[in-house]
Image (cartoon, helix red, strand yellow):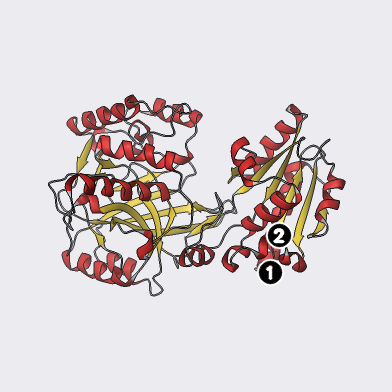
Amino acid sequence: MAIVAPFRALRFNPGKLERLEDVVTPPYDIIDEKNQAAFQARNPYNMIYLDISKSPGKGDNSEERYNSARKYFMKWLDEKVLIRDDTPAIYLYYIDFTLPSGIRLTRKGLVALVGLSEYSEGTVKPHEETFATVTADRLRLMDTCQAQFSQIFSLFADEGASIISTLETGLPEKPLYEVRDTDGGKHSIWPIVDDEILAKVQELFRDKAVYIADGHHRYSTALHYKKQLQEKLGQLPSRSPYNFSMMYLCPMEDPGLTVLPTHRLVTLPDDIIPGLPTMDELAGMMEGAFELEEIKGGAREILVAEVLARMNDRLAEGNNDQTMFGLYHAAEDRCFLLTLKEAALQNKTLTARPAALRELDVVILADMLVGDILGLNYERCEHDNLVRYFADPDEALDVAVKESIKHENVLPLLFLMNNTKVLQVKRVADEHLIMPHKSTYFYPKILTGLLLNKLNPDEKIALK
C-alpha cells in the first residue's frame, strides 16, 4: 500500500558550522515567540529562519515572511552551508534518550519519501483534525521555497522488525551526524544506499499502511500543493517529487517508541459557575461520576508528584482499563486522584461516541469533566483559550499557581493525565475517527534541520 522511496537529502555542511546543535530546532509548531527569538540569536544559519514558526501576529499573512525564508534558503545554498547528497538514500535515524523517570531508551526509525494518497484510500491514516489557516501558512512556505523543511512523524506496523533490520545490514561504519537536543538526547543519522537493500525495503512497505503521529498539517499541505499543481499542469508523472512527502517512519513495536501524557490546565471563568466553586463544591459536583481520594502531606510539587506516582502504580498493577486523573486546585492548594466509576460510562454524552473514542481518557475528560460537569463547551474553550496543554507537569503547576494569584475572576484547574497508547491511536485511525486536540505527545521530537527535501520539478523520484 505505502510507496516508500529514497531521496537525495539536503543537509547542513559540517565544514561550514562549528556546532550542528546551534542550527537545528524542534518542530515549528511547538516553538513559541520567546523560543523563536532564542533560536534566531543562537546562529545566523538556524533553521528557524527557514521553517518559520507561527505567524508573529494574528492575521499576519504578509508575503515578506515567506520571501525572507526563500532568500535565506537561496543564500545558504549558494554559500554551500546546505549541501545535497549525490546518491539517493533511505536514512536510518536513531535517538538515544532518557525519560523523565530516568529510564534510558533508543528509538529507531528511518527517513524516506512516502507517496501521497488521500485519506480515503486508507494508505496514510490520520488521527487529528487539521485547521485551514495552519495548512495555508505551510502551503505558502512550501510554494515559495520549493522545499520540505521538516519530516512528518509517522508509524507503521512491523511485528518482525524486518524493515529496520534490513536497513541495518547496510549501516555505514560512522553516522553522518550525531547531534544532541536540549534534553540531552543523541540524534544519529546514517544513509543507506545499497540498491538491493532499498529495493527490499520498498517491497516490504507495499502491504503496509502509514499512521501519522505528528505532522498532520504538513501532510495536508503536501496534498493541497499536489492538487494545486494538478489543476495548473494536469496529471503529474508518477515519479514527480510533488507526489511525495518526506517522512520519519517508526515501527509501532519499537521499544523506544514513547508517548508522554499531555496535561490540561482548564481555566474556569466566573460566568460559568457564579462565585467560582470551592474544592468541596467541585467534589460534590464530581462524586456522581468519580471516586475522589485526596493526596495530603507536602508542598504542591510533592502533591502533584505523588498523584502522578499513584496513577503510574495503578497502571503497573494492571488497571489499564481504569480511567484516572489527577486534579490540582491551585487556589486552595489541594490535590486529588479521580477514578471513574463504571456506571459513569453510561453518561449520555459518552455513549453517543464510538467505542474507540469512549475508552480514551482525553475524551472522558473533555466530554464528562470539562463539558458536562464544569459546563464548558468546545466552542467556548477554543474561542477563549480556556484549555491549555503541557507536557511538563511542573510548568503547568507553575502557571496554575501564578494565575490563581493574579486573577480573581477565574479558577485554574490542573488535570494530570495518563498517556494515550499507541494501539489506541492505531484503532482510532483505522476506524477513520478523530481524537481531541493534543491527545498524543510523542517523545522525543524529531529535529528540524537534520535532513531537508528540495523539490525540483525536473527530477524523478528513485523508485526501484
- 58 left or right of 86 in image: right
**Secondary element at image label 2:** strand
Circle 1 residue: 319
Q: Residue at x 66, y 69 (%)?
A: 321
The answer to whether residue 125 is left or right of residue 239 is right
Give how far across and how far down residue 9 sits, in percent: 23, 48
Label annotation for residue 324: 2
**330 to 96, vertically: above or below:** above
State left or right for residue 203 relative to residue 101. left
Q: Picture quarter containing residue 403? A: top right
Q: Check contact, mark 1 vs mark 2: CB within 8 A.
A: yes
Residue 397 seen in the figure: yes
Compared to 225, does 126 lie above or below?
A: below
Front residue of 118 and 172? 118
Please name the amino acid that badge 1 sits on.
Answer: Asn
Rendered residue at 28%/44% (across/down)? 452
Position of the N terminus by quadrant: bottom left
Closer to the chain start, of discs 1 and 2, is: 1
Q: Position of residue 116 (x, y in %)?
A: 29, 56
Residue lying farthest to the bottom in this orientation: 160
Residue 27 is at least partly visible in this image: no
306 vs 434, nearest the viewer:
434
Crowding near pointer 2: few (<14 within 10 Å), some, many (20+)? many
Q: Residue 286's image quarter?
A: bottom right
Q: Where is 52 relative to 457, above or below?
A: above
x 23%, y 34%: residue: 81
